[in-house]
Amino acid sequence: MEIKNNIEMDMRNIILGFKKQFAAGFDLAKNTGAELDSKKIKNIFICGMGGSALPGELLQLLTNSLKIKIPVFIHRNYEVPLLADENSLIVAISYSGNTEETISSFKESLGKKLNIIAISSGGEIEKLCKENGVPLSIIPPGLPPRMALGYQFSALLKILENSHILPEVSENILNIIDNLDEEKLDKEGRGLSEKILGKIPLIYSSQKYEPLAFIFKILLNENSKMPAFWNKFPELDHNEIEAFNSKESKFTVLILKSNDENDRVSKRMDITADIIKSRGSEVNFIEISGKTIFEKIINSLILFYWTSYYLAKVQKINPFENKLIDELKNKMKE
């Protein structure tokens, strides 16, 4: 019991220290990326897996909302993205530094003499960067990658600031984090966990906010050790809605909704919720709260972390263990 309590306290402290991750990430990357010529960069590929790919999800949401015209793609695979060329920026993110898919992309990018920048806590990625003169932002080790999202995302943003691909955003984000209502988000996370417990969550959002739905799903999978799935409007109204015909549903539908949704999408959300409820499934709307895209991202992340924390706690499971992932990795080495 003492060990379990320590685990719970550790995760709680990590969430409470999330604002410090952002400050540290911005600082650690302050000298990375300035050597890039932003005028030559036509697209960005984030090469990463698992929790190390999540900064790319948030970057897509941010650049779309800020109407940044450089497209961002996420490459979750081996080798080099097919469309990458001399006008691409390859950002290799591997928290451990030893992710085999990311190392594969890194090495092939080196061979093709592409523009590369990396974010890692060490490992093989750090070694490759030093050997090949690739700019690297080193972040603190010791966390599950999904719990180090603050470090990774802020380092990524600072690199893109330094290279003038993004406008100055770090100060804005730090001001938002300093004014977070942490007690409110903690309470909301606990309440949301109670609605999810014992059900299989289906997380729905608009296409605009699908990165948030996807990250919520990942945190429930890894921290809470539970199945969770996601989809987006309006696409799900052309297929998945037909699955809600059972009067004994094991699912609970969570609809992420912002005050700036497209009017037709917002109407679809409301009608879809009514139809699903009439077929026997629970539906809960979750507000994507905040006046700016930065606030919406930060508030949502903290809410999702708390929700996954309380679900792990009530089920008395270790949120940091990844037994099945570790088993798979070990078998891949055989």
Image: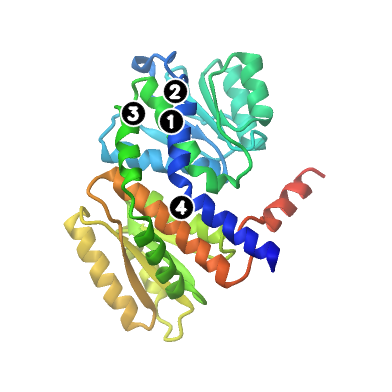
Which comes sooner in the sequence, label 1 or label 4? 1
- In the picture of the structure, the residue carrying the numbered disc 3 is 70
Q: CA distance from mark 2 to mark 4?
A: 26 Å
Which comes sooner in the sequence, label 2 or label 4? 2
- In the picture of the structure, the residue carrying the numbered disc 2 is 30
Which comes sooner in the sequence, label 3 or label 4? 3
User: Helix, strand, or loop for circle 4?
Assistant: helix
- In the picture of the structure, the residue carrying the numbered disc 1 is 26
Q: Are marks 3 and 1 in contact (CB under 8 Å)?
A: no
Q: Nearer the viewer, mark 1 or mark 4?
A: 1
Q: CA distance from mark 3 to mark 1?
A: 21 Å
Q: Is residue 48 left or right of residue 271?
A: right
What count of labels does the image hold?
Answer: 4
Q: Amino acid at mark 2?
A: Lys
Q: Which mark is residue 215?
A: 4
Q: Nearer the viewer, mark 3 or mark 1?
A: 1
Quarter of the image that includes the C terminus:
top right
